[in-house]
Image (cartoon, grey):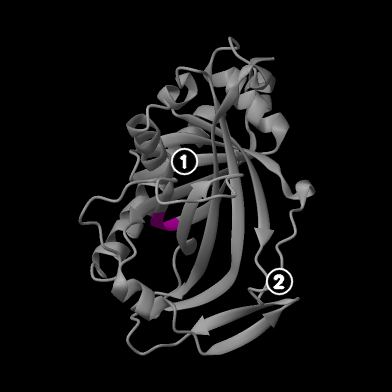
């Protein structure tokens, strides 16, 4: 019976591991990444393959996105303190013709949760969960069943206009070890039609590595230990990539993430 019980605990486990490092998108970043020459059509949108000789790695430019992130927490940010971020994300693809209106598709909204594995606000390692059921389970797990998803309130509601590139080849000609993307977000408060100089406005860049991590015939503890090792390794690779191109990925002054920037802005306005 003991052997049978042990065997039942060994299973196939899948985790979505993401590591990210923030940077300040400066003039050189814009001049290099914005120049795309070859295009390939994907459905109704175009993807641009950048082969600028000045750029030491190869990227493909994905269609722009308009992203609305509504974050949920307790009034005292208890989940954030525990290392859990809960949000509803709505994504709309921006039209190639900038004069066309952006259609808001409510059915594009999905629940997401990020659980911190390591790092800090600028350089982070996460496990990601998608779907309301999984997000609800994470809220219950991390609070020892003391709190439900329905108990949370809106903590922030932000809108990002995102530009995104996927790195196809590194400087040595090899492909990244996992899916690597470079994103730049221009962030404002969601639902604010009249934007003036005092309104929240923040631009931040991130380089991300995303990997679906799978173990077979491992228990939860073994999977979690291996998952942390993967996250540490991917973060090391990401750091090496960015440090190899400091003129493109500036980290001086220290980059500030959108949530940290928003909280600072609210505090200065006396809204916290």
Counting from the top left corner in percent of width and height, residue 189 is at: 52, 44
Mark in the foreground, 1 or 2? 2
State the SS at label 1: strand
> Does residue 98 appear to the left or right of 23 in the view shown?
right
Cβ atoms at labels 1 and 2 below 8 Å apart: no
From what the image shows, is residue 106 above or below residue 175? above
From what the image shows, is residue 248 above or below residue 228? below
**Residues in magenta?**
203-208
Q: Quadrant of residue 104?
A: bottom right
Seen at 53% across and 15% down, the residue is 143
Label 2 packing within 10 angstroms: few (<14), some (14-19), many (20+): few
- Asked whether the viewer can see residue 186, the reply is yes
> Does residue 156 appear to the left or right of 106 in the view shown?
left
Task: Out of 97 and 204, give the one closest to the viewer.
Answer: 97
Q: Quadrant of residue 23?
A: bottom left
State the SS at label 2: loop
The answer to if 207 sits in the magenta stretch is yes
Seen at 46% across and 41% down, the residue is 126
Label 1 packing within 10 angstroms: few (<14), some (14-19), many (20+): many
From what the image shows, is residue 85 above or below residue 253? above
Residue placed under numbered mark 1 in the picture: 126
Q: Quadrant of residue 264?
A: top left
Q: Quadrant of the C terminus?
A: top left
Q: What's the magenta bit mostly, secondary-structure-wise?
A: strand
The image shows a total of numbered marks equal to: 2
Q: Compare marks 1 and 2 and give the one earlier in the sequence.
A: 2
Residue placed under numbered mark 2 in the picture: 100
From what the image shows, is residue 166 above or below residue 21? below
Counting from the top left corner in percent of width and height, residue 142 is at: 53, 20
The answer to if 18 sits in the magenta stretch is no
């Amino acid at each position: 019976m003991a052997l049978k019980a042990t065997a039942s605990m060994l299973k196939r486990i899948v985790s979505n591991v993401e590591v990210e490092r923030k940077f300040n998108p400066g003039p050189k970043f814009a001049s290099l990444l914005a120049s795309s020459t070859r295009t390939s059509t994907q459905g109704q949108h175009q993807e641009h393959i950048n082969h600028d000789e000045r750029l030491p790695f190869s990227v493909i430019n994905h269609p722009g996105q308009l992203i609305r992130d509504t974050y949920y927490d307790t009034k005292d940010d208890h989940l954030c303190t525990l290392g859990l971020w809960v949000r509803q994300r709505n994504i709309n693809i921006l039209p190639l013709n900038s004069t066309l209106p952006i259609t808001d598709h409510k059915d594009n909204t999905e629940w997401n949760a990020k659980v911190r594995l390591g790092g800090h606000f600028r350089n982070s390692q996460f496990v990601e969960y998608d779907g309301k059921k999984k997000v609800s389970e994470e809220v219950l797990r991390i609070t020892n069943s003391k709190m439900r998803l329905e108990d949370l309130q809106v903590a922030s509601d932000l809108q990002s206009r995102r530009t995104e590139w996927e790195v196809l080849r590194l400087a040595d000609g090899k492909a990244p070890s996992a899916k690597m993307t470079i994103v730049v977000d221009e962030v404002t408060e969601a639902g604010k039609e009249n934007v003036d100089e005092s309104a929240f406005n923040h631009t931040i860049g991130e380089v991300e590595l995303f990997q679906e991590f799978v173990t077979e015939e491992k228990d939860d503890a073994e999977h979690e230990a291996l998952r942390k090792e993967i996250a540490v390794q991917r973060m090391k690779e990401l750091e090496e990539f960015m440090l190899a191109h400091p003129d493109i990925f500036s980290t001086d002054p220290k980059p500030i993430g959108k949530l940290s920037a928003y909280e600072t802005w609210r505090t200065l306005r006396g809204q916290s």
